[in-house]
Amino acid sequence: MDCVDEYSHSSPQVIYFSKSIPTKEVEKKIEYSNVFCQCVGSCDQNANCACMKQSGTRYSYTDRTELENYVLIYKNINRPTYECNEQCQCKNTLCGNKLIQCGPRTGLIVKICDDSRKGLGVFTEKLVKCGNFICEYAGEIISEVEASMRFKINARVQRMNYIFCVDEYFGDKNIKTFIDPTFYGNIGRYLNHSCDPNCSMVITRINDNIPVVALFACRDIIEGEELSYDYGITDLSSEIEDPETSRTKCLCGSVNCKGFLPYDTRIM
Ligand SMILES: C[S@@+](CC[C@H](N)C(=O)[O-])C[C@H]1O[C@@H](n2cnc3c(N)ncnc32)[C@H](O)[C@@H]1O
């Protein structure tokens, strides 16, 4: 099951990449997964799939009639899920444990939001069921030093911030991964923040130790609705007009709107 991603960017300044790409500096730190399954055929019928066991679940997804209908099982939100990878025996079969790596769902459109001050946003042309996969948040994987530098430049030139920090704890070890789709990335870069979101992020591992950030619907989303998630969980989108004093006004329009975009000082 190869990745199918037929989206593109309208701006020629942004290069379309379906998957995250590490910069040279980060590339040196990549460790390939030592977990892979020996399943013959489809993993969804096999209780011994090593990748699913690593996720702490027998199945990662239910309703596996076709990829767009897969529904994520939120077994343990604090633990990454592990999809089957290139080393697995299940190879290119229709494996019940491969979804994110197969590319974004169809029917997504990028257009200017009703409140044009938010810029572009992602909308769905068809119903999305709670638990369905939307897309990956793909971009350049950059170092903390690079993220901090780019973040300050974004604030200075008043450019929208796309840098996202994945903050993970393994025992007492804290690992931060920075994803920046400003220049290279996929359709995930256009999802806006909402204080009452209809999508949430799930951290996944596929071929290596670099986290793959995936967006899933956290409720049913009707045709024509804008897709959104809460930047506050792990995001750095504290675009600040004046780094000392002001923050970006939130325009999500929800009744429980907190007034400003989430503010994260981790790379400042
Ligand atoms: C990851 S980008 C989202 C896509 C962006 N709207 C675009 O046109 O490319 C994040 C930026 O979008 C804007 N944005 C996202 N959600 C917003 C919201 N709820 N209210 C105001 N601006 C928002 C902010 O400028 C933020 O830095």
Image (cartoon, rainbow, N blue to C red):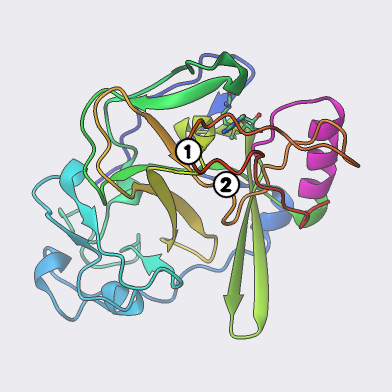
Q: Which mark is residue 255?
A: 1
Determine whether 110 is above or below 31 in the image: above
**Left or right relative to 216: residue 184:** right
Q: Position of residue 109 (x, y in %)?
A: 37, 21
Q: Position of residue 207 (x, y in %)?
A: 43, 61
Identified by mark 1, the residue type is Val
Residue highlighted by disc 2: 231
Q: Does ligand 1 reach within 8 Å of label 2's beta carbon?
A: yes
**Left or right relative to 126: residue 55:** right
User: Secondary structure of the magenta portion, mostly?
Assistant: helix
Residue 160 occupies which quadrant of the picture?
top right
- The tag earlier along the polypeptide, 2 or 1, is 2
Determine whether 183 is above or below 101 in the image: above
Q: Residue at x 59, y 14 (%)?
A: 12
**Left or right relative to 161: residue 156:** right
- Quadrant hosting ligand 1: top right
